[in-house]
Amino acid sequence: MTTANDIIRTAEAEICRPWPRYILSHADWAALTHASVTEPWTLLAHWADTVQAHALFLDPRALTIIPVSTPIEAGHYPALSPVLPGAAWYERMIHDLWGHVAQDGIDARPWLDHGTWPQMRPMATRPEPRTAIEPLLLADPDREGAMMLPLGPVWGRLDEAAHLRLTLNGSTVQHAEAVLGFTHKGTLTLMRGKSPRAAARFAARLSADATVAHSIAFAEATEAALDVAAPTRAVALRIVMLEVERIAGHLDNLTEIGRLADSQSVRTRCGLLRETLLRATAAAFGHRLMMDCVVPGGVATDIAEGGPQVILRALGDIASQLDSIRRLHDGPALALRLAGLGRTDKQLVAALGVGGVVGRSSGRAFDVRTMLSPGYAALAPRIATRAEGDAAVRQHLRLFEISESLRLIGAALDALPDGPLTVALPQASGEGIGCAESIRGDIWHWLRLDHGQIASVFPRDPGWALWPLAERVLEGADADDASLIRASLALPASGMDL
Amino acid sequence: MILRTPHPDPVGPADPETTASLAARLEAAAQARLGRGLAIRHVNTGSCNGCELELRALNNVLYDLERFGLRFVESPRHADVLLVTGPLTRNLRTALEQAWDATPDPKWVVAVGDCAVDGGVFKGSYAVLGGTGLAVPVDLTIGGCPPPPARILAGLRALLEANAK
Ligand code: SF4
């Protein structure tokens, strides 16, 4: 039987750094799709440009990343979804943005395109004007029967905009369907044709609680494409920012779960610690969320004079309270509320390539910091995994990750090298891939530069793997728990709505 | 462990200029609701989630929104204020209009963040209309990307004072 590696070995490759991108015929693309299941490889991302469809695979045993492409022929390419169901949403996105049809795909319904844009296929060489605007019809909660519970897209809870349709049997969810795309902002067209420096502002605004992670993945992809490396001081400062972002994001999640699960003390204390940290961040980096602080080539500005001390003081506050916050999570109220809630299926987590806390709470240890992210090897990040896959374990992992990030920031600030903050970016052409470990797991950016301008780009947010998982997790749950499960999985919208 | 109860930040006066312009506007409004707090309903029209992160911070003990009589509610039917974030994506226009229709008069609309003010960095995209004002009348804008919680709070307090006049 032909293995995935056999197919790759005989394929032509295009220069893409640090991993060559293999060009496959339709037959080989289809064969590779099948072979990927037996290997097993993990599908990390699937996207397109005007002439090719692309897929990014991970070989978890060899720890290599394999980008592959196949030509679009007469508007078609062979679908991945019959074999890899998680690819269906990507295929719908590709159709809505470029107009390419995934031949024999399992779901051809629109995804991002809700019928409201003035043009169809906005990323195609020639987008088509839309003649009739017909917005997607949403269920009205007052008119739907008792069997259907529509939630969102606007939740009124200081949340992201996403729509969940729950089919109920009594109060139990029988079927859950996510409808996304509401926050689609046309980000990819806005990035196209710009310099990486100008486009970085959009990468930083894909998903705000992962703004540093998206900015790093985008910057690394640019640097790879141009075959340059960010200076060591910039690499260390990126680590500090990324880990601060992780702590802030996890604290936000602990606060939110505390609120939803009626734990006033967790809510109050984690909310306060988060605010203390964000104020320190503003003092050290000039922005509470560190938006635009990471740029292609390095970092935008140095850490402020006295910034390390300010950060370390805030981290000290967090460190001194972690144990008691952990005990609150072990206390009867919270432990009972969260135990067994939103349990994930190990096999599905692996098949969808779910990363981050959700993946690690369900036995999948994958974390790009341990093998791919520059500067981390010297710090030897520790990764914890559990098998239970429920909401209780996820909060414990978040607490563990906070303590580990505290250590990583301390070590990085301790050994902060001197030197320049950026490297000059040549006005050159090239193709590259970058990644970063965000609060929700691995983020991947691919881009192609043409004489210093972005010809094509795709950012893969962890939401692509989390939402298909969430639909399954919600099935069988009590409808009243939907918000808590949503928060426990930290489901995003903007990053994958593009 | 710290046992000391944290105190909310000390507060200065609400921005007088904003207060004055809002007060002038309110004179035309049907009824002044003296002495009442304001119920705020958040409407996300496509934000990157940055503005939400800072809105959520308003609930923490250092800002403690509720001490001013300001509180977030989940239903537009119980709201005095629609607080809108995001560049108004075309895909969320209907949702904003529905929320506006469902909010009883008189109502305030506050656009929070550069996106909600005029589309921000997403201005000009085929997928966004470019600001709250393109679908519903806006009473107050609070710029920033995202605006820090202190600035949002100052704006909301100005609204509260105008509402009491
Ligand atoms: S104003 Fe800035 S932070 Fe707020 S939604 Fe827009 S891009 Fe995000």
Image: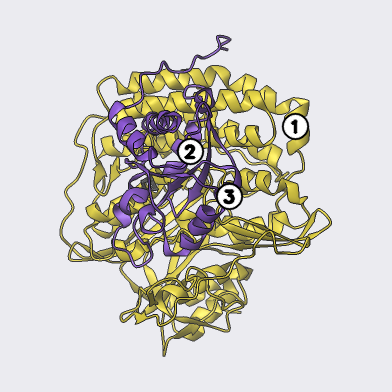
Chain colours: A yellow, B purple
Residue depicted at 26% across the width and 49% down the height: A296
Are the residues flagged by discs 2 and 3 in contact, CB closer than 8 Å?
no
Q: Give the amino acid at mark 2.
A: Gln
What's the distance in space between the residues labelled 1 and 3, CA to CA?
A: 26 Å
Q: Chain of mark 3?
A: A
- Tell me the element at label 1: helix
Q: Position of residue A205 (x, y in %)?
A: 37, 50
The residue that label 1 is drawn on is A335
The residue mark sitting in front, 2 or 1, is 2
Residue depicted at 36% across the width and 34% down the height: B23
Q: Chain of mark 2?
A: B
Instruction: Note whether A464 is above or below A325 in the view shown.
Output: below
**Is residue A485 found left or right of B67 in the rendered image?**
right
Residue depicted at 23% across the width and 58% down the height: A226
Q: Position of residue A203 (x, y in %)?
A: 35, 53
Q: Give the amino acid at mark 3.
A: Trp
Is any part of residue A279 visible from this angle?
yes
What's the distance in space between the residues labelled 2 and 1, CA to CA?
A: 49 Å
The residue that label 3 is drawn on is A155
Q: Residues within 10 Å of mark 3 (few under 14, many from 20)?
A: some
**Is residue A21 found left or right of A7 in the rendered image?**
left
* Badge count: 3
What's the distance in space between the residues labelled 2 and 3, CA to CA?
A: 29 Å
Name, please, the residue furthest toward the right: A170
Q: Nearer the viewer, residue A384 or A253?
A: A253
- Tell me the element at label 3: loop
The residue that label 2 is drawn on is B31
Instruction: Note whether A63 is above or below A80 in the view shown.
Output: above
